Image (spheres, rainbow, N blue to C red):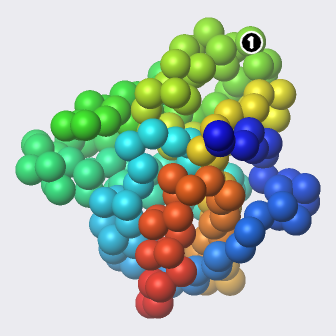
Amino acid sequence: MNKKVRTVLSDKNLNEASKILKLHVSNEDQMTQLARILAPLLPQKGVLLINGIMGSGKTFLCRNFIQAKQENEKKNVEDIPSPTFTLVQTYSFENSEVWHCDFYRIKTTSELLELGLEEAFENALCLIEWPKGLDNLEIFDVANLEIKTGQNINERELIFFSKSEKWKAFAKKFESIIF
């Protein structure tokens, strides 16, 4: 049986995580390359909570994950808009659906539930930027990714962790990447 995992990136999560993985990215090309390498290993169902300051690259990474999945399925590669104003954009794939979410403007848990997230958590891969407000929910198959900016305007440090078995292959590949 899956163990429920708290969803927010906090000291509690860091202490519970089996292994915290870090990766340094020097520029946008490396971030794009990272997404292309990791996209095939995204689980069909699960939740990736993406934290970082404004402009750290959350949408950029999600856009590249989705476009890489489209390329891998030989689909027409779409322009992937930021879900900042729509809150959620959905993308259908052969055996899965991806929900790209941006909860920057969300203020309450009830607003999140009105979006149909409970069903998405069970049936889709959810890439969630600004996952605040989820701390009152417990969901399965959660992974956390924090994007920190570096000293150079294009540098990023990505910190990944998950206790879920669904994210094991993704974590193993993430750990092996060196730029």
Q: Residues within 10 Å of mark 1 (few under 14, many from 20)?
A: few
User: Relative to residue 89, is residue 48 depicted above or below?
Assistant: below
Residue at left offset 66%, top offset 70% = 159
Residue 82: x percent and y percent?
Answer: 44, 38
Residue at left offset 45%, top offset 84% = 177
Q: In the picture provided, is 28 more to the left or to the right than 49?
A: left
User: Relative to residue 116, is residue 87 depicted above or below?
Assistant: below
Residue at left offset 38%, top offset 36% = 98
Q: Quadrant of residue 109?
A: top right
Circle 1: element type: helix
Q: Is residue 40 visible?
A: yes
Q: Which residue is mark 1?
A: 110
User: Relative to residue 96, is residue 11 depicted above or below?
Assistant: below
Q: Is residue 32 visible?
A: no
Q: Residue furthest bottom?
A: 179
Residue 133: x percent and y percent?
Answer: 78, 30
Q: Nearer the viewer, residue 157 or 153?
A: 157
Q: Nearer the viewer, residue 54 or 52?
A: 52
User: Relative to residue 21, is residue 38 depicted above or below?
Assistant: above
Q: Quadrant of residue 136?
A: top right
- The number of numbered discs placed on residues in the rendered structure image is 1
